[in-house]
Image (cartoon, helix red, strand yellow):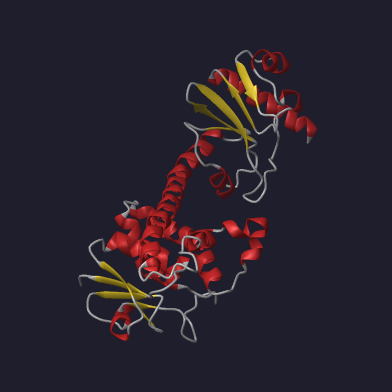
Amino acid sequence: MTITHLVTHSGGFHADELLSTVILMRLFPQAEIVRSRAPEWIAPAEGRIVYDVGRAYDPAAGIFDHHQRPGPLRQDGQPYSSFGLIWARFGHDYLRAAGIPEGHIDALHQSFDQGFVLPVDLMDNGAMEPSVAGPLAGLTLPVLLESLKPAFDDRSPEADDRAFLDALPVARAFVESAIRARAAKLRAEALVMSAIDEAGTSAILELPMGMPFRSAVEKAGADHLLFVVHPRDDDWALTTIRKGSDTFESRADLPAGWAGLADAALEAASGVNGAKFCHSARFIAVAQTRAAILRMAELAVAEARKDA
């Protein structure tokens, strides 16, 4: 069936229908966006997808609203917004259209759903208060997207529609960047897993380039790893491994005597020719050559084990 119209409600917009539109426009770029509450538009019809309006949820009929009671729920009982409903139905197709390898689609669909879609669903339904973000409450994605609505006293007839269309590229940029990052993370995971196998029992993980590695290290159960080394442009980097996604605490810090030093001072403190820099927070160091960075890594491991 050819989709000719994407229909959502008129008036002020929220993040859920805005983000839903991003997904649908990728799949149906020739479809016309209609923002209306007119009964003749918000009812299911041939060639039409209706979302965040219509008081019904019927994927077969092409209608995806969540405002009716009872509203549609996930298997775990958490509520959907229109974004979650659209992602559940069209997310796999969106990822294929974005060129994601078939073998990664299920994992990426789930990751994006839990980390990006679900928070929008919860906030839209009032199931999660913005205040859970603390001082950053005003900087969550739903709040930022909704800040693109026109001012309350801009009563021009086209103000809401114009703001909605202007906000679409912003919303699209967030969706696409989040998908790209998650896709890259999956590609990196295979490389990191191979490097972990090659490292064996060593506490040092050598990677072919800088890439996300912590989640793969955790997935592999590689608790013995303390530091990561990899080439970086014209030099080499040595980095720590954070204990988790919600902390900056590392499994082991670089030696305290290196903190904030550079060049000759760091060479003298470490005893490694080619040592170039160590951050004052002791989570990254840089050296000129692979041999130099591996020596620094060995020294850092020895220091960490001595302090353990």
Where does the image place residue 284, in percent across and percent down from the top left? 63, 31
Q: Is residue 157 left or right of residue 182?
A: left
Where does the image place residue 68, in percent across and percent down from the top left? 46, 85
User: Quick one: quadrant of the N terminus?
Assistant: bottom left
Name the residue located 47 percent from the left edge and 25 percent from the top edge: 233
Q: Is residue 157 left or right of residue 222?
A: left
Name the residue located 46 percent from the left edge and 42 percent from the top edge: 188
Location of residue 281 with respect to 4 vertically, above or below? above
Where does the image place residue 275, in percent across and percent down from the top left? 62, 18
Location of residue 136 with respect to 269 vertically, above or below? below
User: Quick one: quadrant of the C terminus?
Assistant: top right
Q: Nearer the viewer, residue 253 or 197?
A: 253
Name the residue located 49 percent from the left edge and 38 percent from the top edge: 211
Can residue 109 be seen here? The reply is yes
Q: Is residue 136 left or right of residue 5?
A: right
Q: Nearer the viewer, residue 77 or 79?
A: 79
Name the residue located 51 percent from the left edge and 66 percent from the top edge: 120
Can residue 87 be seen here? The reply is no
How many labels were placed on the picture? 0
Where does the image place residue 116, in percent across and percent down from the top left? 50, 60
Q: Quadrant of residue 133?
A: bottom right
